[in-house]
Image: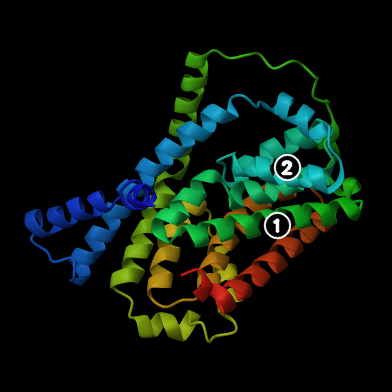
Amino acid sequence: MIIFEWFNNQLLKMEWLHDLVRILVENVFGLSIGSRLGGSIHFFIYDVIKIFILLSVLIFGISYIQSFFPPERTKKILGRFNGITANILSALLGTVTPFCSCSSIPLFIGFTNAGLPIGVTFSFLISSPLVDLASVLLLASIFNWKIALAYVIVGLILAVIGGTIISKSNLEKYVEPFVYNNKVADAEAEELTTKERIDFAKDQVLDIIQKVWLYILIGVGIGAAIHNWIPESVISALLGQDKWYSVPLASFVGIPMYADIFGTLPIAEALVAKGVGLGTALAFMMGVTALSLPSMIMLKKVVKPKLLGVFIGIVTVGILIIGYTFNAFGYLFM
């Protein structure tokens, strides 16, 4: 228990970094972290460094594991299963692919092209941007393990149910024809050496960091502003737990944005600190990561409006249910 507590506080929450940044702000900048400006600078520096350290380490580890499961091998594994079992495995696969929704769409095309049922590929498409192993540890580092695990579980349930509904609805004809063309050959995946796997993992770290660094900086900046500059009374008036519309409003606000969970976590952290319901904060995160407008524009290129509408409807209803549930029972996780 003592070892776990040390691991949680020092490696995940990085309390040592929190103290170092406090010394920097107070002794070098001459600002108290209790002041608005000092608190904002501390929040920004601490969260940015912590997220980039965790993100780099986690993506490297996940990518190294992922190198053993290229698309050809993954397709063969998933192809052995049918029904809800395939949806569950596809949703779990999404948790080990550290992609944003736009990056997940090409892999979704590849799986559909390779002959996997669209319901199975939609389970992957829902879970991949919404839930991943990196988000588990980052959520635990910002909130706690109960919230992190609960978020992952409900995200996987949403992905499995969404994919299953699409499977049962026989919507294959609403996928654009080009997706089914040029079937992927069942070629054996080339075995990689340890050095090649390490190089692959390094490349993935650099590639993903290059894609998300700006969104992380923006997200942390917004979080710092909310945390230190916007009065709690203003936040509560808009998104307080007593406001029935807070969950749909937070989901709707997130849709025009384009970011991933790493950029939205600092905003959610600041909102919860200001008294916003846990479900409202999670609904905002889910709206950004699963239903962002740029992602829907890309998805519209590969599926027809009816299937796109079904996908949006399923995910929206799921987010609302999750949001209201966490708002009602969030005290159990705090």
Q: Is residue 89 left or right of residue 30?
A: right
Q: Which residue is mark 2?
A: 90
Helix, strand or loop under label 1: helix
90 in relation to 165, above or below: above
Sort mark 1 into few (<14), some (14-19) or many (20+) by Cα contacts within 10 Å. some
244 in relation to 326, above or below: below
Residue 182 percent location from the top left of the image: 83, 25
Give the residue type at disc 1.
Ile
Q: Give whichever of 108, 168 is nearer the camera.
A: 168
Residue 166 percent location from the top left of the image: 84, 54
Helix, strand or loop under label 2: helix
Q: Earlier in the sequence, mark 2 or mark 1?
A: 2
Q: Which residue is mark 1?
A: 157
Residue 189 percent location from the top left of the image: 69, 17
Rendered residue at 92%/51% (across/down): 170
- Marks 2 and 1 close (CB-CB < 8 Å): no
Sort mark 2 into few (<14), some (14-19) or many (20+) by Cα contacts within 10 Å. many
Residue 208 percent location from the top left of the image: 48, 37
Distance from the alpha carbon under mark 2 to that under mark 1: 12 Å
Asked whether the viewer can see residue 44, the reply is yes
Rendered residue at 81%/56% (across/down): 305
Q: Is residue 310 left or right of residue 231?
A: right
Give the residue type at disc 2.
Ser
Q: Is residue 304 left or right of residue 132?
A: right
- The disc placed on residue 126 is none
